[in-house]
Image (cartoon, rainbow, N blue to C red):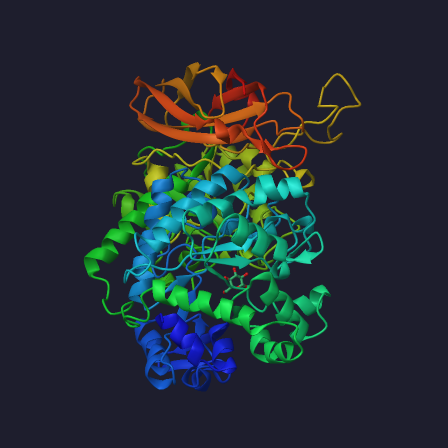
Amino acid sequence: MSRIDRLIAAMTLAEKLGQLTMTASSYAVTGPVLAGDSTESIRNGTVGNLLNMVGAAHCHEMQKLAVEGSRLGIPLLIGLDIIHGHRTQFPVPLAEVATFDPGAWTMTAREAAIEATADGLAMTFAPMLDVSRDPRWGRGVEGPGEDPWLGRRLAEAKVRGFQGKELGAADSLAACAKHFCAYGAVTAGREYASVDVSERSVQEVYLPPFEAAVAAGVATIMPSFTDLDGVPMTTHARLLRGWLREKHGFDGVIVSDYNAIAELMNHGIAADRVEAATLALKAGVDIDMMADCYRHGLPTALERGMVTMDEIDTAVRRVLTLKERLGLFDDPYRRGRKADTPAAILKRRRLARDVAARCIVMLKNDHDTLPLGSLHKIAVIGPLADAAPQMAGPWGAAQEPEKHVSVLQGLRNALPASTEILYAPGVEISGEDTSGITAAVTLCDQADAVVLCVGEAAYMSGEAASRAYLDLPGQQRSFAEAALTRAKHCGKPVVVVLFSGRPLVVPWLVEQADAVLAAWFLGSEAGNALSDVLLGSISPTGRTPMSWPRALGQVPIFFGERPCGRPFNPKDHFTSKYIDSPNDPLFPFGHGLTYGRFVLSNLRVTPTQVRETDIIEVRVDVVNEGARAAEETVFLFSHDKVASVTRPLLELKGFAKIALRPGASGTVTLHLPATELRFPGLELTPVFEPGEVAILVGPCADRTKLLVASVQLAR
Ligand code: BGC
């Protein structure tokens, strides 16, 4: 008999339900303080999993209670939201996606895992893979942005990074693909709201990143809080049992979201905890996070014949198997035994700086305002200029905000002592006090250049942070307009450093500034990374993974829209348009300037007659006609012109980067497996249809900037 069989045979019902329960714990310097009765519950085997612990000593203390204090000695699974780094904070995921560099995505996850496991943790609730096309929703910051193909690449990279080569290694974390699925489509971008999207969109847009996570071997999956067309995801048997487990062979653990099983009562599909627990277990949810419905509801459900012991045992087996794969039975203390060396921490900070610099998206740079040349005096103004604690953005339970680098500090570190730095915050991020505006604005007169640091506070994106207005919060607009007017009046260039967890709607700001950097939230090394780009030691390479609207009324806005019968035609009134705004975004997906000037030409595609098993080779020449070395990102899109169902106007199928010195040229080669040109047909099953497919290549999703070729698909 295997260890797991033996354990299951020996377990009482209460002990089994303990393995299906995850409870929060907090910690204090004096030792762990557990929520409610957890300490005793760990000892008597009725809590088997914890979340929200930080610190190896605390984790080990709890582990000891389970391993040495409980009857069967089953180790605890301890997890935490390690979303973008642990103590060292890397850029928020949306920012990191802007690097379009899967290698970087893996490296930061790997480093986060090393740091978090050194702290005793075995599981993270990441990566978040919810495609998001509505910037009102605050959680877009945690995920891949607007495109499903990009979401697939992110899924693979992050799972690989967190889980390492082998889940049992002392520095591997169990990853959790969340939130399954279509959370990003909440009604009106409002957090936790209902989701109503077509089955086609579910298949084409929202599921693919999860499919990729499963293929990459993700250990756990979390259903989202939301419903999907009337069925809460926590009870969505067709997708959890059917699609995930049966169709895609996912045999890992499904862990509910925080209190989500109890919330089935609010959704209005369960009258009490017994019904809620029954629905979730039957749908395939193994661990009940924080709702305590399994412990309270399943005994009655079992008595009434609503669930079977077999169903409970199946879930218990999955949890125990995960603990076994994590190596917890062999050595429950393997994580947290070795503290990080100072050299490792230093290396991690370097990575954080390097990746952060590559996340920055230069939205605008008129008259080569950037990089800033040699300066006698620089004014660094705005409420986010000297705001170290804001730099990491949302999530970061274990972050050490005092070690984050502000913009002001970053510039101080980089500028020679001869450059004088003038600083004033002007206003608070969200306050109403305008008394500091004049003093800050006056600094523009004396300086050679102005760096205006504005945007959202860290807490304004992330969970429970939907916004109905996407302009600058508080009094920042009045302040920024005053500064821009004053600077223009005295002929001083203004560079806006814009912090946000989402695309903001700030056309007025972009219009008036000389240069704009989208800084997202860049993590511990934010200020150093920004000064690298501002001063030119690094040429910006970031590209926006979400479209930036001109007006809030344009959202949801994304490049993968399907065509319509009356496409916009300026000469024809009765076509698809707004009467008060252009249709296109202010900045399209993929937009991002560099310090180079790239020209693409000579698009070649082979073969042009394509069978389903072929791999299409796409080549394009790139030359840097600018005066500085830089890196260009080349995107590959397709468009199926005539198909049995309408196809998106552009579908992302690849990207590549090329670094070129001034005057240098090179060729970018991309490979597109023809199977990627399949789509869900009329019956929603994948089809490969003969006919012409356009292949479009260029620097962003703006059609007017794309080179076009075409291939013929043949059976
Ligand atoms: C969030 C999850 C998170 C969980 C545990 C929930 O509120 O939706 O993303 O993993 O809390 O902290």
Left/right of residue 620 with respect to residue 225 in the rendered view = left
- Quadrant containing the C terminus is top right
Q: Point out residue 294 in the picture as x, y percentages from the top left corner.
A: 57, 74
> Closest to the observer: 268 or 609?
609
> Closest to the observer: 326 or 626?
326
| Quadrant hosting residue 673 | top left
Q: Point out residue 54 in the picture as x, y percentages from the top left corner.
A: 37, 70
Q: Point out residue 115 in the picture as x, y percentages from the top left corner.
A: 31, 60
Q: Point out residue 364 in the picture as x, y percentages from the top left corner.
A: 48, 32
Q: Residue at x 54, y 70 (%)?
A: 310
For the question of whether residue 505 can be seen, the reply is no
> Closest to the observer: 255 or 669?
255
Residue that protrudes farthest toward the right in the picture: 574
Q: Residue at x 75, y 23 (%)?
A: 566
Q: Residue at x 44, y 25 (%)?
A: 367
- Quadrant containing the N terminus is bottom left
Residue that protrudes farthest toward the front in the picture: 1
